[in-house]
Image (tube, helix red, strand yellow):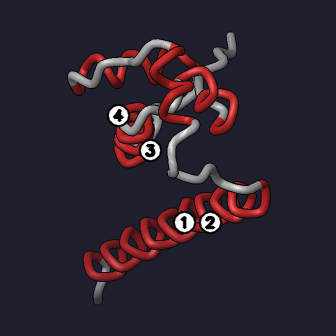
Amino acid sequence: MTQNYKPAYPAEFRQQMVELVALGKCPKQLSKEFGCHYTSIRTWCRAAGVPIRSSQAIALVATSSVPALSAIERQELLELRKKLKRVEMERDILAKATAWFANNKD
């Protein structure tokens, strides 16, 4: 029997979502933008003690001087995250290979 199990999000990703909510971003919008579930973001915020602001407060922050990411910047951010994930995976593979070779010296 196959289960549809999605691995846990990296701690850095969860922290970034919490920080964005703390800056006034809407968790529902973040969930659409980054492809994670709204309740996950809400749970991470509760665990970190970060309150989720009302939609009125979020609208007030949205009209402030903090510019939103453009479509190009958002795409670049997603591409950089994918590249980082690949590089981290390569690093982990190299670390395991190094350890294996160190243990199997003749």
Drawn side of residue 4 relative to residue 22, left or right: right
The residue at which mark 1 appears reads as 84
* Mark 2: few/some/many CA within 10 Å (<14, 14-19, 20+): few
At 33% from the left and 23% from the top, the residue drawn is 45
Q: Earlier in the sequence, mark 3 or mark 2?
A: 3
In this rendered view, identify the residue nearer to me: 27 or 57. Answer: 57
**C-beta proximity under 8 Å, tags 4 and 3:** no
Decide: few, some or many residues near mark 3? Use Cα within 10 Å; few <14, some 14-19, many ≥20.
few
- SS label for mark 2: helix
> Which residue is found at the position 36% from the left and 41% from the top?
19
Q: CA distance from mark 1 to mark 2?
A: 6 Å
Choose the circle earlier in sequence order: 4 or 3: 3
Q: Position of residue 4 (x, y in %)?
A: 66, 18
Disc 1/disc 4 C-alpha distance (Å): 24 Å
Instruction: Assess whether mark 2 and mark 1 are in contact (beta carbons under 8 angstroms).
Output: yes
Depth check, mark 1 against mark 2: the one in front is 2
Residue beneath disc 3: 13
Image point (69%, 29%), residue name? 32
Tell me, for residue 34, which label it has, or none.
Answer: none
Where is 105 relative to 70, above or below?
Answer: below
For badge 4, the amino acid type reads Ala
x, y percentage for residue 82? 64, 59
Front: mark 2 or 4: 4
Amino acid identity at mark 3: Phe
**Mark sitting earlier along the chain (1/4):** 4
User: Label 1 to label 3, Cα distance in Å?
Assistant: 12 Å
The disc placed on residue 22 is: 4
Identify the amino acid type marked 2: Leu
Q: Residue at x 78, y 62 (%)?
A: 72
Q: In the rendered view, does 53 fall on the left or right side of 99?
A: right
